Image (cartoon, rainbow, N blue to C red):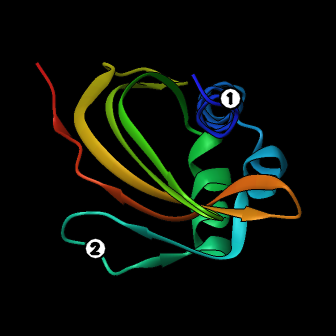
Amino acid sequence: MEFDEQAIRSVIDQWVRATAAGDTPELMGMMAEDAVFLTPGQAPMQRDDFAAGFSAAMEHVRIDARSEVQEIEVAGDWAWCWNYLDVVVTPRAAGAPTRRVGHTLTIFRRENGAWVIARDANLLASGV
């Protein structure tokens, strides 16, 4: 596995760990300043909106995810990754966990030698 592919896999693993820990500052460090997140039925979400929504959600839920990288392609200082995600969101108070599964397409950009998320299209749907 080439160096850049392994570095991107490390960012993905770090993202999953930071999400489970509710670590908004760590997640922010893995995003480009102009990062955009796309989800079905929602307006595009800018970096700061993502951070605010994530921080607010972490007060009420815990998120555990499993990521299976399907493909990574690198072209200079840009890369894209197709992933399969399995995400369980568990309320901190009473309530049943919900599961979302599906694919994501993430575009990474190399900034100052590190790979960061520039765009992310998340196609998760209710899971079984």
What residue appears at the point 62 percent right and 29 percent down from the top-left corner?
2
SS type, badge 1: helix
Residue tagged by mark 1?
A: 10
Q: Specify whether 126 is left or right of 14.
A: left
Residue 31's disc number:
none
Residue 33 place in picture, x, y as percent: 73, 77
The amino acid beneath tag 2 is Gln
The residue lying toward the viewer, choosing from 2 and 104, is: 2
Instruction: For the N terminus, give its image quadrant.
Output: top right
Q: Relative to residue 65, is residue 97 drawn left or right? A: left
- Residue displayed at 85% across by 56% down: 113
**Of residues 94 and 121, the one drawn nearer to the viewer in this rendering:** 121
| Residue 84 horizontal/vertical position (percent) | 29, 31
Sooner in the amino-acid sequence: mark 2 or mark 1: 1
Mark-to-mark CA distance, 2 and 1? 28 Å
Residue on which disc 2 sits: 42
Q: Is residue 7 left or right of residue 35?
A: right
For the residue marked with disc 1, what is the amino acid? Ser
Count neighbours of disc 2 (C-alpha within 10 A) and say few if under 14, some if 14 to 19, many if 20 or more.
few
Q: In this view, does 10 lie above or below 74?
A: above
Q: How crowded is mark 1: few (under 14 residues within 10 Å), some or many (20 or more)?
A: few
Q: Which quadrant holds residue 85?
A: top left
- Which residue extends farthest right? 112
Could you say which is closer to the camera, residue 73 or residue 65? 73
Tell me what residue is drawn at x 89 percent, y 64 percent. Answer: 112
The answer to whether the residue labelled 2 contacts the one labelled 1, judged by CB atoms less than 8 Å apart, is no
| Rendered position, 68 above or below 113 | above
